[in-house]
Amino acid sequence: MAKKAKIFPIYVLNGPNLNLLGEREPEIYGRTTLADIGRMAAACAEDHGLNVEFRQSNHEGALVDWLQEARSGACGVVLNAGALTHTSVALYDACKALTVPLIEVHLSNPHAREPFRHHSFISPAAKGVICGLGVQGYLLAIDALAALLKESTK
């Protein structure tokens, strides 16, 4: 009997202050909590026969470690690096080293906000960028990764 191929999870990684979603600046980020997004992401992935590894850290090094882990432990990555998007060369280097597709996500549209938010160190290493669509952006990113994975197995 043939062995079933192991399906790795989609890593959904969240950066600084995203643990405060629902409380911090709800006029910008909405009232949905990060735990709510985690449940929605899991349900969306399940619809595609996939699962997610949903994580958040306020520490840049933890995100770098998880991106490196994703090289051999994930089938794709959804990354909302929060403010580190605009400042972290270390995250850029870790994203560039990925061997799986990366989708960058932002709840708000950084291009419609303060000028310092207009630049992303993550975008050049990403397969795609979704911003300004709120929580829906995470679900669209999972849909996009599922489509990319399906296409790569044809």
Image: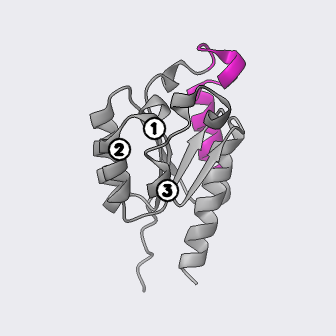
Mark 2 crowd level (few <14, some 14–19, many ≥20, 10 Å Cα)? many
- Give how far apart the Cα atoms at labels 3 and 2 are: 12 Å
The answer to whether one can see residue 45 in this image is no
Residue found 49% across the figure and 32% down from its top: 82
| Residue on which the image places disc 1 | 85
Q: Relative to 141, does residue 152 appear above or below in the rendering? A: below
81 in magenta: no
| Magenta highlight range | 22-45
- The type of residue carrying mark 3 is Ala
Type of amino acid at the residue the image marks with label 1: Thr
* Disc with the residue nearer the chain's start (1 vs 3): 1
Name which quarter of the figure residue 26 lies in. top right
Give the amino acid type for the residue marked by disc 2 in the picture.
Leu
Position of residue 47 relative to residue 64, above or below, is: below
Say if mark 2 contacts mark 1, CB within 8 Å.
Answer: yes
Taking depth in this image into account, of 95 and 56 the one nearest to the observer is: 95
Reply above or below: 1 against 151.
below
Assess disc 1: are there few (<14), some (14-19) or many (≥20) residues with their C-alpha within 10 Å of its C-alpha.
many
